[in-house]
Amino acid sequence: MNRPFAEKCRQLDDLLGVGRCFDMVSRELYVGDRRAKLWVVNGYAKDLLLERAVEKLQAIPTLADIPDLDALLRRYVTICDAGTCCDRMQAASDVFAGKTLLVVEGYDGGLLLDAKEYPTRSVQEPDSGKVLRGSHDGFVESIMENAALLRRRIRDPALTLERVRVSRRSQCDVALCYLEGRADRKLLSQLREKLRSAPIRSVAMSQETIAEAIAPRQWYNPFPKTRYTERPDVATASLMEGNILLLIDNTPAVMLLPVSLLRFNEEINDYYFPPLVGTYLRIIRFFVMLLNVIITPLWYLLATDPAGLTPPWDFLLVQGDCAVPLALQLLLVELLVDVLKLASLNTPDALGNSFSMLGALILGDFAVQSRWLVPEVLVYMAFVAVSNFAQHSFEMGYACKLCRMALLLCAITLRWWGFALGLVGVLVLMATAKPIAGRGYLYPLLPFDGKALRSLLLRRPAKKDNT
């Protein structure tokens, strides 16, 4: 009996959890005239591919003329993605990632065979990024399938997908995706260093865990430090502009870097319409975002200062009586809108329409009849709620909401001076926000870059390639 081989198998059984984990499969077999053993996670195994590879190895008459595993790999292993490994911990990590480990008696290390098939859903269009025209596919939770969706669109040798493994416990796969020669090398170096030195023990919340680990510490600043997309066409356009993607295994959300405030004004539908229509949509989106922040504080100041409003602006005044102060009404409806959003997330689809009607009745007719709210509050808060859907970034929508509520509180306490100070405070937050990567949150305004500013504000026609 070969004790070193038996001891090696026992150590790997203990490390991989054979007998302890029901999904860990081990199998003893013969390769040529020697004993061998393989380990694979049952949920990952691609049975037909693995059976063909094992059948080929078992058909070897003898291993006497094969000096090492590298020679065995070259001559008899038919799986394309295969290699040798002598590090036991690395081999265990690869098995948990889906590979099959094969150890053969008399050889150091083992063979790692990539015969896996991840359980995944179809590449259907994401709910948060639907388009009228264009492709209707979306990223999924598998980093390999997401990479394939990008390769399908960019068939260029310059497309580089560089893998970085983060987290000591989760061993999560992260890929830096960029076009060689177009991406900023300094920015790439910064991102590599941040990922490799990120203090991450476990990637529990996928992209959010990594974003919080590599982003500058600014808990008080509500503006998002990165953008996300679940659409391959958006990611492709970003790559072609020289940006960098961060693909993270187990999540369909892809990070788009670098980031700045005006980049949140871009949306994929702009590019599926003619340039003039796309420019119009961007301008509308920009002004809606601006109104979303200032409309309720500004209306509150005007409505509570009747002497300053003369015809034809007197329609801004509150016409009826109410039992609740106007400022409290605005804050109350802000909170109620969030309560409805949270409740809708947990409402089954079959009851979603009924729940929306019930919420509208409670906030609308019943609240006005009971004199809790005045109709004007519902009108302005309805505009705010609808305008949030014009912003495709959920994080930026809540940043605008928090700034609006802060402006409202300033206006309540210090009136017009408070409103002015609140606006200055919002601008300071924007100017001092530190994104994960990039020249600054207000770029291309600070530092000023006229060409980049025009490209963000105006939808320009696609450039012709004259090479």
Image (tube, grey):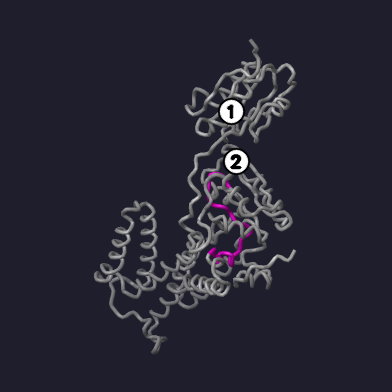
Which stretch appears magenta?
248-268
Image location (x, y in percent) of residue 24: 52, 27
x, y percent for residue 368: 27, 71
Dot 2 lies on which element? loop
User: Residue beneath label 1, please?
Assistant: 52
Would you name the residue on which mark 2 appears?
167
Q: Secondary structure at mark 1?
A: helix
Q: Is residue 264 magenta?
A: yes
Q: Earlier along the polypeptide chain: callout 2 or callout 1?
A: 1
| Residue located at (65% from left, 35% from top) | 80
Q: Is residue 271 above or below residue 232?
A: below
Q: Looking at the image, which residue is at 57% across and 48% down? A: 146
User: Identity of the amino acid at label 1?
Assistant: Arg
Up the image or down, 261 lies above or below 174; here it is below
In this rendered view, identify the residue nearer to me: 15 or 32.
Answer: 32
| Spot occupied by residue 132 in the image (x, y as percentages of width and height) | 48, 64
Residue type beneath disc 2: Ser
Foreground pick, 260 / 427 = 260
| Residue 48 in view in this figure | yes
Which quadrant is the N terminus positioned in?
top right
In this rendering, the answer to whether 109 lies above or below 414 is above
